[in-house]
Amino acid sequence: MNHALSTLPPDTGAEHTVAEIAQQPALWREVGRIVTAERTALDNFLGPLLAAENARIVLTGAGTSGFAGEVLRTALSGHLARRVDAVATTDIVADPRGCFVEDVPTLLVSFARSGDSPESVAATDLADRCLSHVAHLVITCNGKGRLAREHGRKTASRVLLMPVAANDQGFAMTSSFTCMLLAALLALGPHATADFVGELVHAAEHITGGGLDRKLNALLARAPQRLVYLGSGALKGLAQESALKVLELTGGAVVAAADSPLGFRHGPKAVLTEDTAVVVYVSNNPYTRRYDLDIVAELRAALPPGGVIAIAARPDGLAQDDTWIVPVPEGVDDAAFALPAVLCAQLIALRASLSRGIRPDNPFPSGEVNRVVQGVTVHPLPNG
């Protein structure tokens, strides 16, 4: 196993989580092969719908799966020149007619690790009820899940199944998140599969192979009681996923929050204390990057040394100390940068969990929070 993860002590209740973080570079290559094999069928399925000028693409999922849509939204909108919205399944189930108020040709892209959470299938059923013309692209890690089984036999649906190992057995989604995110970028985005995937794999292997270990150890040595993640555009979705990983793997012991650099000043900044660490994902977009650099400078002047980490693809405009470089090619878009960058957040969450004696594979042993959501009753939608 690679260095960043092999140094963790055994018998810590982290076996699944450690393996699932480590396996991501290898699984990304497999995802590339899967999408390449499906390319013609995907183009034939998607082409007629996306040809409509008023087509709408809705990216949906719950929790981590929903944040995949938040990361992808702007990148896919720019590439497809179509309206792209990220709408959580939880919002669709609670207010379907509000989410589908415009009856236009719609592609519903559903992200689901298991496909067995109550909202996953309900959201697709409600889309069928509310819209005259809807097609479904289901990206899931579980071929035996209800979502895959039901949509696998529908002509208006296409199921894109991730590698078996991407169906994480640990509590938190790690490789499932990145595999589904990559698959959507390859299926709907502008990227050429082989070279693009290889570049992201190289960046991920730098992180899992120990390239950021020293800086990771320095951050965790501060034992922050609060973690704030900030990101603009696509990286706001990454910030949301990063904060959720800390909350999940530490069983809520570390308070975590996410926002955009500009939005953070409007009240949420009140969360800051001397025990808070802030991680800012720095955009590759030259215009957006200026706002990210502003918040890094502002917070570094206000917080103790080592309390503000910048994670970026390139170092310009950033001091070397407390800056983590994720070595993706120059000019890569932020949705793609998010793929290796999220490994930083996964490692932070894992190490924060272990340092508090929590077992990351099952941080809620009493069952108050579950790997697959329970306790949701999906109520019938009245006619009209």
Image (cartoon, grey):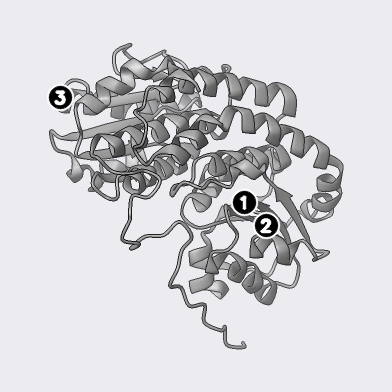
The spot of residue 289 in percent (x, y) is 43, 26
Question: Which quadrant of the figure contains the C terminus?
Answer: bottom right
What residue is shown with label 1? 84
Q: Residues within 10 Å of mark 1 (few under 14, many from 20)?
A: many
Point out the frontmost of discs 1 and 3: 3
Task: Inspect the image, locate mark 3, and give the three-letter code of the amino acid beneath it.
Answer: Pro
Please state if 360 lies on the left or on the right of 338 as rendered.
left
Q: Nearer the viewer, mark 2 or mark 3?
A: 3
* Three-letter code for the amino acid on which mark 2 is drawn: Arg
Q: Earlier in the sequence, mark 2 or mark 3?
A: 2
Query: How many discs mark residues in the rendered view?
Result: 3
Numbered tag placed on residue 304 in the rendering: 3
For the residues bearing labels 1 and 3, Cβ distance under 8 angstroms: no
Residue position for label 2: 56
In this picture, residue 98 sits left or right of residue 263: right
Q: Earlier in the sequence, mark 1 or mark 3?
A: 1
Which element carries disc 3, helix, strand or loop?
Answer: loop
Which residue shows up at 53% across the image and 46% down it?
168
**Image quadrant assignment for residue 228:** top left
Q: Earlier in the sequence, mark 1 or mark 2?
A: 2
